[in-house]
Amino acid sequence: MGTPMTLPAAVDLRSAPVVTPLLDFLAGLHAPALACIWPSPHAEFLALPAARRHVAAILAGRSTCSAAHLRWMVDRARDGELAAELFGREPPGGLMKALGRMGEVLWTYTDYVRFLDLFGEESACILIRHTKALRAETLSLVALLPPSLRQASILTHLGTDDRAAADLVAAWAIALRLRGAGAAPGLAQRLGRAATAGALFGMARDMIQPLAFGAAGPPPDLPAPFQPVRQLEALNAAALEFRNCLRDFVGDLAAGRMAVYVWRGDGGPAAIALRQDPAGWRLAEARGRDNAELDDGVLGAIAAAVQSAGVRTGESWGWLHRRLEDRACDAPAGSDPVPADGWRLRLGLGNIWD
């Protein structure tokens, strides 16, 4: 794995160096540190191959590398030595060639960290080695994709659309839930053969279809501190305790499409609703009295507990299916809903009617 670069640069910036407009354009936030090592007009730095300039930016962001050592390495070390400096002993082959395909403008520290981490993963490393021009935006999508979907053809259809990548990842997770992990190789091979983006998402839409119709099974037996609500009397009592509209869902509860529990753990109580959709049982709602939002710690504990019992968390099957259908039909981007930002929103709570 790559070395984290969250610590400040080792270069002393107390005396502001002169930064030429060209270095400022090419190096961005790295420019002051690099100008201390290669003073204005920075001719020796600018004459370096692009790969070595990227190495300089990475090493300048590490507190373990002195300015003198950095300059010697970038100016004089062999490619293999530089790769070992970045990665440690026995770095993956092709690292310097990949750095040379990153373009002339230096990346951010965060993007370099992502690149080095991905280059240490076999599936991502293979993909990076076969990518002619590397972009930070592209690698952010590679980081989102599971190893089986890190294919050049899939990446080409996604472009730099992180919403589309997130939808594909969500569809992949549901498909494996419905079909089993053994279906992964075949599904990945099929997705990799998609000729267009529309075809890719048409396949994703098809792979989340249920293989058989009918109820997915009875509600799960959640352990304490969950208390199941299975009788009308208990439902009325819960509705009074939480002062909410649980009684409006009698029809769904009776038909087996919904299940209600009261969670009485630390930070509770909380009213919990599970919803059954074509992908199985899903956490649809979790609220306190008067429909108050739960603290992060409480909600996180509830989500972890239902997941361990085999319950899915995330948005409903219906919302995802609609978006995949739109993408398969090349619907205008304006019809695409804004993606959820933050782990609470990604739980997809509140969509209990789907």
Image (spheres, grey):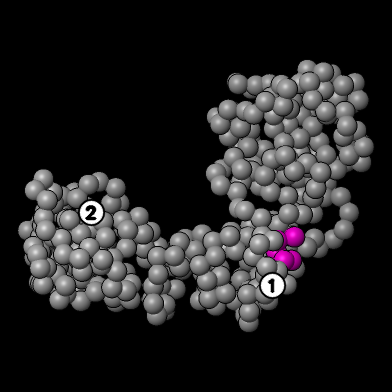
Residue 22 in sight from this viewpoint: yes
| Residue at point 64%, 65% (across, down) | 333
- The residue under label 1 is 330
Local SS, label 1: loop
Q: Nearer the viewer, mark 2 or mark 1?
A: 1
Residue 146's place in the image compared with 245, above or below, is below
Q: Please name whichever residue, 178 or 209, is drawn nearer the observer in this view of the structure.
A: 209
Image check: 345 left or right of 105?
right
Place of residue 283 in the rendered image (x, y in percent of width and height, measured from the top left): 71, 40
Residue 89 in sight from this viewpoint: no
Q: Which mark is residue 71?
A: none
| Residue at point 14%, 70% (across, down) | 45
Place of residue 172 in the rendered image (x, y in percent of width and height, measured from the top left): 64, 61
Asked if the stretch drawn in magenta spans residue 301, the answer is no
- Indicate the amino acid at tag 2: Gly
Q: Please name whichever residue, 353 or 228, is drawn nearer the observer in this view of the structure.
A: 353
Which secondary structure is most common in the magenta stretch?
Answer: helix
Place of residue 213 in the rendered image (x, y in percent of width and height, measured from the top left): 87, 58
| Residue at point 73%, 72% (across, down) | 329
| Residue at point 75%, 60% (across, down) | 322
- Indicate the amino acid at tag 1: Asp
Image check: 142 left or right of 280?
left
Give the quadrant of residue 18.
bottom left
Residue at the extreme front: 21
Local SS, label 2: loop
In the picture, the quarter occupied by the N terminus is: bottom left
Residue 266's place in the image compared with 253, above or below, is above
Q: Which segment is the magenta one?
A: 322-328
